[in-house]
């Protein structure tokens, strides 16, 4: 962690992991407990995230080598902000 970039990337990875873990843990419980869904519906609720997570990781790794970190961070932040606006 001697470089600022690696320290920042590690801190962001920690924040993202801390955000994703409750979603994976509690979303199925919400679907089953509050919405009255069965276990299959709970699995389908988190399936889009669990399928796209490894796929987007591979794509982002390849694009990181091609374009660098800054454009990917900007595009990713814009996508997250846009999806947040669509949800809200």
Image (tube, rainbow, N blue to C red):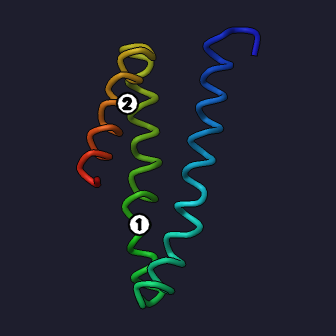
Between 15 and 64, the one nearer to me in the picture: 15
Which residue is tagged 2?
Answer: 77
Q: Which labelled disc corresponds to residue 8? A: none
Which residue sits at x=46%, y=39%? Answer: 57
Between 37 and 64, the one nearer to me in the picture: 37
Relative image position of residue 1 (x, y in whole percent): 75, 16
Which residue sits at x=59%, y=67%? Answer: 25
Label 1: few (<14), some (14–19) or many (≥20) C-alpha neighbours in 10 Å = few
**Residue that protrudes farthest toward the right in the picture:** 2
**Position of 82 compared to 44: left or right?**
left
Q: CA distance from mark 1 to mark 2?
A: 22 Å
Which residue is tagged 1?
Answer: 47
Circle 1 — which element? helix
Sequence-wise, the earlier of marks 1 and 2 is 1
Between 57 and 31, the one nearer to me in the picture: 31
Position above or below: 61 against 39: above
């Amino acid at each position: 962690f001697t470089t600022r970039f690696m320290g920042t990337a590690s801190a962001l990875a920690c924040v993202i992991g801390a955000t994703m873990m409750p979603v994976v843990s509690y979303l199925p419980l919400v679907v089953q407990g509050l919405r009255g869904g069965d276990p299959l519906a709970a699995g389908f609720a988190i399936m889009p995230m669990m399928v796209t997570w490894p796929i987007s990781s591979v794509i982002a790794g390849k694009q990181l080598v091609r374009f660098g970190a800054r454009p990917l961070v900007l595009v990713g932040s814009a996508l997250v902000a846009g999806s947040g606006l669509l949800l809200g």
